[in-house]
Image (tube, rainbow, N blue to C red):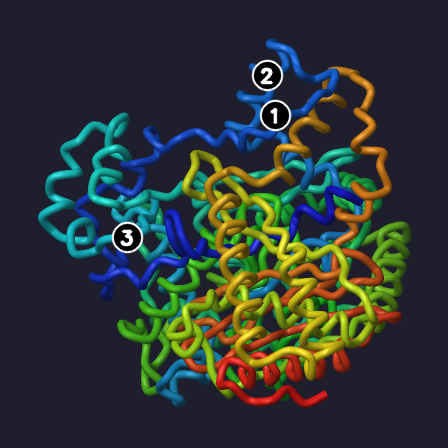
C-alpha cells in the first residue's frame, strides 16, 4: 500500500530554492523538422548534475541499518532511480486509476483549428518535431533561471556550451541558474510498460518509425518518419488520419485494450497467450510505436466529462501501457494520459508545452489544407488480433471489472474566480500554501478532523531525481483551520492573517526542504527498501501505527501550472480518500477532485469553496461567516 501512496508524482515548483520546475515556453520554435535549434546541447548539464542524497535524517536514525556499509549502500541507492522503478514496476494493481494521471490542453485559440482532423494532424506533427529535436540534441536544456537577465541570454549560452559537461552545472550555478534532470525524456517515445509476472519491464525501441492510432477499439499503424528519419509530409499524415476517421467498421466485439486495465499478473499471463497465439508481430508494433494517438468519436460535454474521459474513458480506445496516449475528442478537446513508471510530470509538462506552442503558432496544416492524394489503404495497416476462447474470456472479464470500478469514481470541479496568484503574492502569502490550507479547512468542516496529506514535489534538480513529499498538514494548518472553522468569532481578521502567514512560512520551508532532498518520506522509503534487500528486520518505526497512518493519504494532492493546461486529474490513492488536482492561476484557482463511495467530492469542493471565501474575507479584513 505504501508504494501506491508514493507514486503520485506531478511536478510542483518550490516557492524558494531552485524555484518552479515548470519552465517557460521555449523560444525559437518553428515549422520544419525541428521545434528549435538550441546552441547548448540538450544533455549538456546531465553529467554534472548533483547526486540526490536526502537529508540528514539518516545520521539521527538509531536503527540496525546505521553502519558504514549500509550508509554507502544507501548513498548509492538514493543517487540512482532503480528502487523507484522497482516500486512502480512491482506494483500488481491495475495502472488505470491507481497510477496513471491525465493533463488536458486548453483549446487552440483559433477555434477553427479545433477540428478533430486538423488538431490531430498538427499535434502529431509537433510531437514528432519534439522527438526529432530531442534526439538531435537541439532541444533547449531544462533550466530554471533565478536571474534570467544573466543566465537566459545568448551570451551566457554561447559561453556555457564550451564548458565541459562534467563542469557545466557549476557554470550555470554561478549565475543562479539550475539545470534539471532530463534522463526521463528518452522514454517519452517508442516506449511501453510490458506486463510481466512479479515485475513489469519498460521497453523502448528508438528505431521504430510508426505511429499507433486507436479508434473505436481498432488499432492502426503508419509511418510518421521515413527511412532517412525525416518527418513524413503533414498532408500525408492528414490523409492517413482522415482515412482512419472514415473507417465505418463496427467496434470489435472483444476490444483488446481492456487487457491493459487488468491486474498486472493477470495481464502478463494473458499477454503471453496473446503472443503465442500468432499476435507477436502486432504486439511488437503496438509496443514500439512512437506514441499512441486516440481518436474519440464524440465531443466533450463539460469539464467533468472531460476528466472521466481522459482519466479512464470507456477502456476500449486507450493503450494504457504506452508511455503516453494523446487523446483527441470529436470536438478537438485534447489531453495526455501517461503511464507513470517511466517518469514524472516535469518531462510530460515540457512536452505538453512545446507541442501546444508549436501546433498553434506553427501549425503543419490549416482547416483549409487538403490531404495528400495518396493511397492510405496501403500506407495504413490495420492490426488484426487472433483471439482464442481464453483471450475472449479474459477481455470480457477485464471489461466487467473495469466498468464496475469506474462506476464507483466520482469527479467534480470548481473554479474559484475571486482571486489567485497575483492577489496572494501581494499579501506575501504562498499561493500553494493557501490552496493547501483550504483543503485542510474543508476536510475539517466536512468530517471534523484533519488527516494525512500528500503533496508531490519534483526533485529534478538532482541527477535522476524523481519526487519527494511535502506534508502540508501541520500544527500551523491545524490551528489555523480550527480558528476558521470552529471559532471564527473569537479571532480578529488580523489574528487570522497572522496564522495564515505562519502556515505560509512553514509550507514554504517544507517545500524548499523537499525540493532540495531534505524531506523524510523518500529517505524512509530507501531505508525500508535496503532492509528488505539485505534481509534485515524492519525497525519498529515502520510497525508503528502512526507510520501507517501518515502513509494512508486521505488527501492526495498535486498541482500543475502552465498557461496551456486546462485541467489535470487522478484518482484517490486510498479507497476512503480524495484525489485533488489543483492549480493556482494568476487570477483564479481551479480544483479537480475525485472520490470513491464513502467520500463525497461535491460536498468536499463546496467546503473548499467556503474555505477560500473565508480566507479571502480574512485577508480583506472582513468578518468570517459561520
Would residue 541 appear left or right of 519 to someone viewing this image? right
* Secondary-structure class at tag 2: helix
Q: Which residue is mark 2?
A: 71
Question: For this rendering, which residue is in front, 549 or 343?
Answer: 549
**Residue found 68% across the figure and 26% down from its top:** 527
- Say which mark, if any, is on residue 441: none
Q: Residue at 16% of width from left, 56% of height from top?
A: 149
Q: Is residue 513 visible?
A: yes
Question: In the rendered structure, are the residues bearing label 2 and label 1 in contact, judged by CB atoms less than 8 Å apart?
Answer: yes
- Up/down of 568 relative to 167, above or below: below
| Distance (Cα) linking label 3 and label 2 | 34 Å
- Residue identifier under label 3: 146
Name the residue tied to disc 1.
58
Which mark is in front, 3 or 1? Answer: 1
Residue at image location 63% in from the left, 84% down from the top: 298
Of callouts 3 and 1, the N-terminal one: 1
**Residue 267 in the figure: left or right of residue 344:** right
Residue 186: % across, % down: 44, 43
Residue in the foreground of this view, choosing between 122 and 88: 88
Amino acid at each position: 500500500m505504501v508504494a501506491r501512496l508514493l507514486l503520485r508524482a506531478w511536478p510542483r515548483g518550490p516557492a524558494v530554492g531552485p524555484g518552479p520546475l515548470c519552465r517557460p515556453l521555449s523560444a525559437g520554435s518553428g515549422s520544419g523538422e525541428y521545434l528549435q535549434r538550441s546552441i547548448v546541447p540538450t544533455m549538456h548539464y546531465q553529467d554534472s548534475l548533483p547526486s540526490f542524497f536526502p537529508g540528514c535524517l539518516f545520521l539521527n536514525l538509531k536503527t540496525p541499518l546505521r553502519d558504514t556499509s549500509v550508509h554507502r549502500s544507501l548513498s548509492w541507492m538514493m543517487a540512482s532511480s532503480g528502487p523507484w522503478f522497482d516500486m512502480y514496476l512491482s506494483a500488481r494493481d491495475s495502472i488505470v486509476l491507481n497510477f496513471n494521471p491525465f493533463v488536458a490542453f486548453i483549446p487552440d485559440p483559433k477555434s477553427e483549428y479545433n477540428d478533430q482532423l486538423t488538431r490531430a494532424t498538427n499535434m502529431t506533427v509537433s510531437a514528432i518535431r519534439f522527438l526529432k529535436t530531442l534526439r538531435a540534441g537541439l532541444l533547449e536544456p531544462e533550466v530554471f533561471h533565478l536571474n534570467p537577465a544573466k543566465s537566459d541570454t545568448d551570451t551566457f549560452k554561447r559561453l556555457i556550451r564550451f564548458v565541459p559537461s562534467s563542469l557545466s552545472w557549476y557554470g550555470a550555478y554561478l549565475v543562479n541558474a539550475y539545470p534539471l534532470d532530463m534522463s526521463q525524456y528518452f522514454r517519452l517515445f517508442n516506449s511501453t510498460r510490458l506486463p510481466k509476472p512479479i515485475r513489469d519491464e519498460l521497453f523502448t525501441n528508438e528505431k521504430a518509425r510508426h505511429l499507433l492510432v486507436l479508434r473505436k477499439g481498432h488499432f492502426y499503424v503508419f509511418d510518421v518518419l521515413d527511412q532517412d528519419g525525416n518527418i513524413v509530409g503533414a498532408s500525408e499524415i492528414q490523409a492517413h488520419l482522415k482515412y482512419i476517421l472514415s473507417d465505418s467498421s463496427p467496434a470489435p466485439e472483444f476490444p483488446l485494450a481492456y487487457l491493459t486495465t487488468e491486474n498486472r499478473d493477470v495481464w502478463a499471463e494473458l499477454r503471453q497467450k496473446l503472443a503465442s497465439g500468432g499476435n507477436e508481430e502486432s504486439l511488437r508494433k503496438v509496443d514500439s510505436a512512437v506514441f499512441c494517438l486516440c481518436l474519440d468519436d464524440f465531443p466533450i460535454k463539460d469539464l467533468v466529462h472531460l476528466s472521466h474521459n481522459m482519466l479512464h474513458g470507456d477502456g476500449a480506445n486507450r493503450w494504457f501501457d504506452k508511455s503516453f496516449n494523446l487523446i483527441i475528442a470529436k470536438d478537438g478537446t485534447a489531453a495526455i494520459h501517461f503511464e507513470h513508471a517511466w517518469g514524472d510530470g516535469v518531462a510530460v509538462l515540457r512536452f505538453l508545452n512545446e507541442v501546444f506552442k508549436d501546433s498553434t503558432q506553427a501549425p503543419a496544416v490549416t482547416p483549409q489544407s487538403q490531404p495528400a492524394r495518396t493511397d492510405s489503404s496501403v500506407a495504413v495497416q490495420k492490426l488484426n488480433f487472433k483471439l482464442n476462447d481464453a483471450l475472449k474470456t479474459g477481455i470480457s472479464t477485464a471489461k466487467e471489472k473495469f466498468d464496475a470500478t469506474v462506476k464507483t469514481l466520482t469527479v467534480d470541479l470548481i473554479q474559484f474566480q475571486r482571486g489567485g496568484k497575483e492577489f496572494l503574492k501581494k499579501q506575501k502569502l504562498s499561493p500553494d500554501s493557501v490552496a493547501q490550507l483550504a483543503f485542510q479547512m474543508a476536510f475539517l468542516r466536512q468530517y471534523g478532523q484533519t488527516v494525512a496529506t500528500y503533496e508531490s514535489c519534483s526533485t529534478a534538480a538532482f541527477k535522476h531525481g524523481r519526487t519527494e513529499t511535502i506534508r502540508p498538514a501541520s500544527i500551523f494548518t491545524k490551528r489555523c483551520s480550527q480558528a476558521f472553522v470552529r471559532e471564527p468569532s473569537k479571532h480578529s481578521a488580523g489574528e487570522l492573517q497572522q496564522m495564515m502567514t505562519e502556515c505560509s512560512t512553514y509550507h514554504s520551508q517544507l517545500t524548499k526542504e523537499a525540493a532540495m532532498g531534505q524531506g523524510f518520506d523518500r529517505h524512509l522509503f530507501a531505508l525500508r527498501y535496503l532492509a528488505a534487500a539485505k534481509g534485515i528486520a524492519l525497525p519498529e518505526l515502520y510497525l508503528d501505527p502512526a507510520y501507517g497512518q501518515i502513509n494512508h493519504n486521505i488527501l492526495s494532492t498535486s498541482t500543475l501550472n502552465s498557461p496551456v493546461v486546462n485541467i489535470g486529474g487522478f484518482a484517490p490513492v486510498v479507497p476512503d480518500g480524495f484525489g485533488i488536482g489543483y492549480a493556482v492561476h494568476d487570477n483564479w484557482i481551479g480544483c479537480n477532485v475525485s472520490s470513491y463511495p464513502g467520500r463525497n467530492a461535491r460536498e468536499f469542493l463546496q467546503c473548499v469553496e467556503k474555505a477560500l471565501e473565508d480566507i479571502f474575507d480574512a485577508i480583506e479584513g472582513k468578518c468570517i461567516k459561520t
